[in-house]
Image (spheres, grey):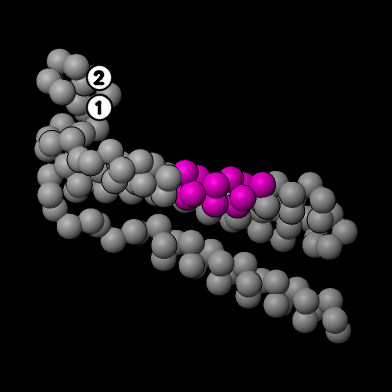
């Protein structure tokens, strides 16, 4: 594919390197979409918490938890986009693939949510 056949966006996001095997590009896209699904689950979970858990939590705590969960979803979506570009650039230039920086974020969010659930369950059981 010549430089003129590439879109302006593609030339800006992926300025160098050669076109990788389409299977690898499509696998990178599937991974991106999996991260986006995870992000959407966090967004839906935070929205559901704020909308439907009015009796389970006091309003300030519920709102802060919902904002934290929604914020984690937003960060995962942004991280997924950055990861897609970094992997695509690495494949095009023959460099090693970058480590996934959003994995620690997701792990931290999951640990925080689990600890919060344990505290709530122990608090409700008393």
The image position of residue 101, as x and y in percent, is 34, 59
Looking at this view, name the residue that lies furthest to the top. Answer: 4
The image position of residue 44, as x and y in percent, is 66, 47
Mark 1, residues whose alpha carbon is within 10 Å: few (<14), some, or many (≥20)? few
Instruction: From the viewer's side, name the closer residue of 39 and 68.
Output: 39
The image position of residue 113, as x and y in percent, is 62, 67
The image position of residue 105, as x and y in percent, is 44, 61
Tally of marks: 2
Q: Secondary structure at mark 1?
A: helix
> Left or right of 91: which side holds 77?
right
How far apart are labels 1 and 2 at the CA level?
Answer: 5 Å
Mark number displayed over residue 98: none
Q: Which residue is mark 1?
A: 10
Mark 2, residues whose alpha carbon is within 10 Å: few (<14), some, or many (≥20)? few
Q: What residue is drawn where x is 61% and y is 50%?
A: 41
Looking at this view, name the residue that lies furthest to the bottom. Answer: 126
Q: Quadrant of residue 1?
A: top left
Which residues fall within the magenta stretch? 32-44
Q: What residue is drawn where x is 59% and y is 56%?
A: 68
Q: Quadrant of residue 119?
A: bottom right
Is 1 located above or below residue 23 in the figure?
A: above
Residue 110 visible in this rendered orientation of the protein: yes
Q: Which residue is mark 2?
A: 7
Q: What residue is drawn where x is 72% and y is 61%?
A: 61
Q: Are marks 1 and 2 in contact (CB under 8 Å)?
A: yes
> Left or right of 37: which side holds 44?
right
Instruction: Please state, as top left, top right, bottom left or bottom right, where the C terminus lies in the image.
Output: bottom right
Q: What residue is drawn where x is 21% and y is 28%?
A: 12
Q: What secondary structure do most residues of the magenta stretch adopt?
A: helix
Instruction: From the viewer's side, name the closer residue of 7 and 51.
Output: 7
Residue 67 visible in this rendered orientation of the protein: no
């Amino acid at each position: 594919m010549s430089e003129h056949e590439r879109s302006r966006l593609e030339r800006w996001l992926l300025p160098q390197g050669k076109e990788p095997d389409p299977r690898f590009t499509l696998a990178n896209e599937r991974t991106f979409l999996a991260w986006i699904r995870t992000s959407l689950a966090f967004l839906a979970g935070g929205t559901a918490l704020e909308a439907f858990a009015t009796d389970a939590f006091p309003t300030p705590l519920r709102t802060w938890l919902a904002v934290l969960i929604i914020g984690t979803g937003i960060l995962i979506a942004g991280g997924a986009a950055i990861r897609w570009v970094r992997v695509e650039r690495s494949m095009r230039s023959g460099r090693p693939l970058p480590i996934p920086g959003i994995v620690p974020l997701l792990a931290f969010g999951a640990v925080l949510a689990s600890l919060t659930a344990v505290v709530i369950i122990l608090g409700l059981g008393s």
